[in-house]
Amino acid sequence: MDLLIINGPNLNLLGRREPGIYGSRSFDDFFPELVDGFPDHKLTYFQSNHEGALLDKLHEVGFSHHGIILNAGGFTHTSVALGDAVAGIATPVVEVHLSNIAAREEFRHKSLIAKHCAGSIAGFGLESYRLAVQWFASQRPKRVGFQV
């Protein structure tokens, strides 16, 4: 199963940025552990601080992968374009957040992406990604355009 993790703005700073909220471990340190935990699946990831690059990546893989795990960071609450991109692709998307966005500032309570996703996982730190991969592994979604 081909799964892509897409991380949005400021997630390149994990491990250094507000460790009380986001933890003290970088995604680069966590990712190999995640890959090792799912040897039967092909996991890749992409990170950008630029909304257009995230849109381009969703368009690029949104018809070829089994699943996308999307942590859009702050764009979750502001980007109609990312919500539209998720709605416009065929690959299922799981929205992920490290912190519990419902327990944070009011503006973080609304996601412009969630209604277009298969589901949302929030509040479990980096383990949120593992939970998303586990869901995809249990669902075994078919790759769009292929009889797999």
Image (cartoon, helix red, strand yellow):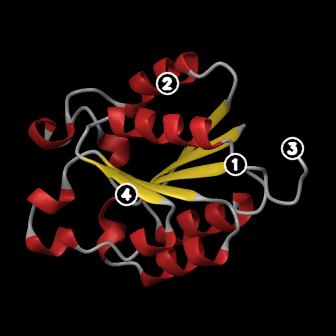
Tally the numbered discs.
4
Q: Is residue 122 left or right of residue 44?
A: left
Q: Within the image, what quadrant is residue 79 found in?
A: bottom left
> Label 4 amino acid?
Pro
> Label 2 amino acid?
Leu
Give the SS element for disc 2: helix
Which residue is located at x 51 percent, y 34 percent?
A: 134
Estimate the spatial distance between the alpha carbons at disc 1 and disc 2, rounded to whole Å: 19 Å
Q: Mark 3 points at which residue?
A: 148
**x then y, percent, for residue 115:** 43, 74
> Label 3 amino acid?
Val
| Mark closer to the observer (4, 1) | 1
Task: Sort mark 3 into few (<14), some (14-19) or many (20+) by Cα contacts within 10 Å.
Answer: few
Task: Sort mark 4 into few (<14), some (14-19) or many (20+) by Cα contacts within 10 Å.
Answer: some
> Earlier along the polypeptide chain: callout 1 or callout 2?
2
Task: Sort mark 2 into few (<14), some (14-19) or many (20+) by Cα contacts within 10 Å.
Answer: some
Q: Name the residue under label 1.
A: 141
Q: Name the residue under label 4.
A: 9
Q: Which of 60 and 35 is in front in this view?
A: 35
> Earlier along the polypeptide chain: callout 4 or callout 2?
4
Estimate the spatial distance between the alpha carbons at disc 3 and disc 1, rounded to whole Å: 9 Å
Give the SS element for disc 1: loop
**x then y, percent, for residue 105:** 8, 66
Q: Which mark is residue 34?
A: 2
